[in-house]
């Protein structure tokens, strides 16, 4: 009989420990969710910065294209007042500026693509893992 009492006491102790674990889990879950939300907020802010950088690079491309147009206009003036070598050098400068504008535009597009979609992917994955852990914990102890 005393063996049954000891076995019953050990079983009750295990259940109270399990109940304590579930209680602790329910206490810690809100903090876990808050930390995942903070991670999501930081990730969205990072993607916003990348989008801003991409927009800045697109603006730089527009500025370089503007200077290319200005150079092309200056080349037309030189062509009227001079012979072939002066305006040819102006065209070469304009072509180089337009090529630089194209490179900057491609870089800007790449930055914008890295920032989209603006959802916090790492935080979502972390939250999915947390939910799966809680589910597996509950299932294994029921």
Image: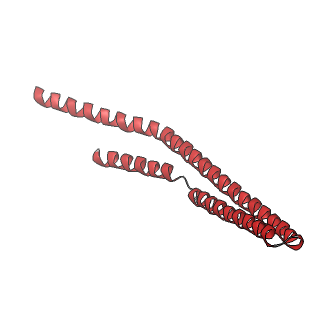
Q: Nearer the viewer, residue 37 or 106?
A: 106
Q: Can see residue 1?
A: no
Q: Is residue 106 above or below residue 19?
A: below
Q: Identify the image's colour scheme: rainbow, by chain, secondary structure or one colour.
A: secondary structure
Q: Residue at x 69, y 64 (%)?
A: 96
Q: Could you tell me residue 55's position as x and y percent?
A: 69, 57
Q: Could you tell me residue 138's position as x and y percent?
A: 34, 46
Q: Nearer the viewer, residue 66 or 124?
A: 66
Q: Residue at x 85, y 66 (%)?
A: 74
- Left/right placement of residue 66 relative to residue 37 reads right
In this figure, what is the number of numbered marks? 0
Q: Residue at x 16, y 27 (%)?
A: 6
Q: Nearer the viewer, residue 1 or 82?
A: 82
- Left/right placement of residue 66 relative to residue 58 reads right
- Left/right placement of residue 72 relative to residue 21 reads right
Q: Quadrant of residue 20?
A: top left
The quadrant of the picture occupied by the N terminus is top left
Q: Could you tell me residue 106's position as x and y percent?
A: 62, 63
Q: Nearer the viewer, residue 33 or 24?
A: 33
Q: Can see residue 106?
A: yes
Q: Could you tell me residue 93's position as x and y percent?
A: 74, 63
Q: Quadrant of residue 109?
A: bottom right
Taking the view exactly as shown, the residue that stands out farthest to the top is 2
Q: Residue at x 21, y 29 (%)?
A: 9
């Amino acid at each position: 009989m005393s063996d049954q009492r000891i076995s019953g006491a050990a079983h009750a102790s295990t259940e109270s420990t399990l109940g304590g674990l579930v209680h602790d889990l329910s206490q810690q879950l809100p903090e876990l969710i808050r930390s995942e939300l903070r991670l999501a907020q930081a990730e969205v802010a990072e993607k916003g910065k990348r989008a801003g950088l991409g927009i800045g690079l697109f603006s730089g491309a527009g500025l370089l294209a503007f200077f290319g147009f200005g150079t092309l206009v200056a080349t037309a003036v030189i062509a009227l007042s001079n012979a072939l070598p002066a305006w040819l050098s102006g065209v070469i400068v304009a072509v180089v500026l337009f090529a630089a504008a194209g490179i900057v535009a491609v870089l800007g597009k790449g930055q914008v693509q890295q920032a989209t979609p603006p959802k916090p992917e790492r935080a979502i994955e972390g939250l999915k893992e947390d939910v799966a852990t809680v589910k597996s914990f509950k299932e294994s102890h029921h």
